[in-house]
């Protein structure tokens, strides 16, 4: 998706930024929930504390890399792509796009469909 962000109205830009921030918060919430479940499993496992730590450390490191790939360099030119990706992986629901301009919404939906293929 090329830099359509510059062509958006102020209202659409604001909505896109708010949705991305909401998606980031949801991404972190899911990550923390995953870590909590892992810790609960590790508490009852027969592994040594060192092995438990190693598993938790690897999960946190992998999550950090995934967050970095998705959100580092978050500039306006990448906003619509980031939002489309968040929709494709279920962080943002399509129904939350209702306040966007119809053209912007359609472009995002097309991009999401391409990502899901």
Image: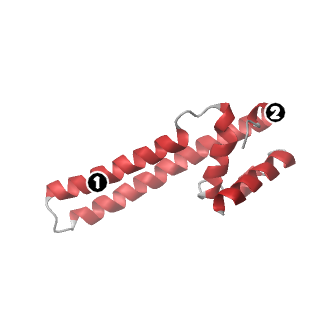
Asked where in the image residue 52 lies, by quadrant, the reply is: bottom left
Q: In x, y percent, where is residue 67?
A: 48, 44
Asked where in the image residue 100 lies, by quadrant, the reply is: top right
Quarter of the figure that contains the N terminus: top right
Asked where in the image residue 47 lies, by quadrant, the reply is: bottom left
Kindly identify the residue that appears in the image at 35 percent across and 57 percent down.
36
Kindly identify the residue that appears in the image at 59 percent across and 47 percent down.
23
**Earlier sequence position, callout 1 versus callout 2:** 2
Kindly identify the residue that appears in the image at 28 percent across and 54 percent down.
56
Kindly identify the residue that appears in the image at 65 percent across and 54 percent down.
87
Q: In x, y percent, where is residue 60?
A: 35, 49
Q: In x, y percent, where is residue 92?
A: 64, 53
Q: Which of pointers 1 and 2 indicates the residue nearer the eye?
A: 2
Residue closest to the eye, 84 or 25: 84
Whether residue 23 is situated above or below residue 2 in the rendered picture:
below
Residue closest to the eye, 86 or 100: 86
Whether residue 60 is situated above or below residue 88 in the rendered picture:
above
| Few, some or many residues within 10 Å of mark 1 (<14, 14–19, 20+) | some
Q: In this view, does 116 lie to the left or right of 13?
A: left
Q: In this view, does 103 lie to the left or right of 95?
A: right
Whether residue 41 is situated above or below residue 78 in the rendered picture:
below
Residue closest to the eye, 15 or 112: 112
The residues tagged by marks 1 and 2 sit, at their Cα atoms, a distance apart of 43 Å
The residue lying furthest to the right in this view is 102
Residue carrying label 2: 7
Residue closest to the eye, 81 or 48: 81
What mark, if any, has residue 56 been given in the picture? 1
Q: Is residue 95 left or right of residue 60?
A: right
């Amino acid at each position: 998706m090329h830099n359509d962000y510059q062509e958006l109205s102020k209202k659409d830009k604001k909505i896109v930024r708010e949705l991305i921030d909401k998606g980031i918060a949801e991404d972190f919430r899911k990550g923390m929930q995953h870590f909590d479940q892992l810790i609960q499993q590790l508490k009852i496992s027969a592994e040594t504390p060192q092995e438990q730590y190693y598993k938790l450390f690897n999960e946190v490191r992998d999550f950090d890399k995934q967050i970095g790939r998705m959100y580092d360099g978050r500039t306006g030119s990448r906003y619509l792509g980031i939002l489309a990706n968040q929709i494709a992986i279920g962080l943002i629901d399509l129904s939350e796009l209702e306040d966007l301009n119809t053209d912007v919404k359609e472009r995002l939906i097309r991009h999401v469909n391409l990502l899901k293929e």
